Amino acid sequence: MRVSALILLLSTLISGCNSSGSDGLNYNPGSSGNTKYAARFDLYPEEDYTLIRVFNPWQNSKGTSYSYVLGEKQEVLPDSLRTLPFIHTPVSRVVAMSTTHVAMIAGLGESSSIVGASGTPFIFNPDIRERSEAGLVADVGYGQGINYEKVVSLEPDVVFLYGVEGNVTSIAEKLGELGIQVVYCAEYLEQDPLGKAEWIRFFAPFFGKEQEADVSFNRVDSSYQALKSITSRNLVKPNVMIGLPWKDTWYVAGGRSYASRLISDAGGQYLWQDNTSDEAIPMDMESVYSKAVNADVWINPGVALSIDELIAFDERFGELEIVRQAEIYNNNARMSPGGGNDYWESATLRPDLILADLISVFHPKLMRDHSMFYYRKLK
């Protein structure tokens, strides 16, 4: 048994060190030392199996953890792990409940294993769309509207599940009662762009693609760091605002959020960077507008496809200098015919490409030869 796994198992016998997670093991993210940026999962690879742990897989789920053991033979497991869910690998039939799961699996070259997905019309991946149209990938519904009969009929080896709130546990319990193996995923909650991309290493052991995942992730990591170093010099940082209101409420990304980190790494000054939240903060229009007058660049304005559409949301936008100067960039350059946005799919794996786009927006002189991939300027 490797030292990392031995430490984990011993820690479960020591009282008073950490609170116990819902899997019965001590809650100790990152204890294996096998993840570099991700905070929501951990890996304990052994010769004959891999122990995977997922932490806080929905919002406000503090101190919650789930563990899974992956391998070919359950009988080789130590007694301490035999009560945990066991998944025979490599898997060959899976259901992906998020487009980011689709991207991770496709990134491993295993898109043919996807037999079911949530919201197939909104998937960007051309191969999955073609297989869906051919009846090879079923739409299994979403949230409380999941088609349980359809999921069972697909006979998946595993369903990759995510949830925004704790009621996702009722879905997992129902699937479990039907004999379906469920694995929680929490990649969307990672605040570090590279931490989110590192989730390809979470999916890899299910398919026996650990080496391929490491090579892919390390390449992205190196690319991201090289780009980030470009903006580490003494640059004039533009003030950046983000988002679009929804029903008179503007959900502003917190100062410790994924979006805030990307803006900072790209050499921008996020208007709400002093906020300590890592989640979206609801604000009224007046509060946001008072900051917007100081913005130099506006990114990610929701579903807007043009400046006219932005002004249609609120005519006051037309008075903003960033609107008059057309300094507005949206992350919807890659859209599927059904409305799927590749920014919420493959970009999860390629934060380096997002960073390159944002640097070209904030500091165009540093990226003269770059053609934006996920972003486009609104006209």
Image (cartoon, rainbow, N blue to C red):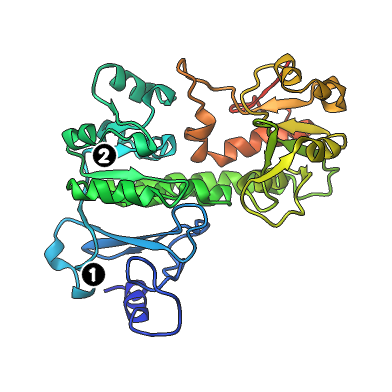
Above or below for 74 versus 373:
below
SS class of the residue under badge 1? Answer: helix
Above or below for 118 versus 311:
below
Q: Where is residue 10 in the image (x, y as percent from the top left)?
A: 33, 81
Residue 109 horizontal side relative to residue 238, left or right: left
Along the viewing direction, whichever of 198 and 17 lies nearer the viewer = 17
Q: Position of residue 305 (x, y in %)?
A: 65, 18
Along the viewing direction, whichever of 73 and 247 lies nearer the viewer = 247
Q: Position of residue 112 (x, y in %)?
A: 27, 31
What's the residue type where badge 2 is placed? Val
Instruction: Determine the image quadrant of residue 362.
Output: top right
**Which residue is located at x 60 percent, y 45 percent?**
224
Residue 181 horizontal side relative to residue 251, left or right: left
Crowding around mark 2 (Cα neighbors within 10 Å: few <14, some 14 to 19, many 20+) is many
Residue 134 horizontal side relative to residue 359, left or right: left
Q: Which disc number belongs to residue 94?
A: 2
Residue that carries the numbered disc 1 in the rendered image: 81
Inter-mark Cα distance, 2 to 1: 24 Å
Residue 86 visible in the snapshot: yes
The quarter in which the N terminus is drawn is: bottom left
Pointer 2 or 1: first along the chain: 1
Residue at far left of view: 75
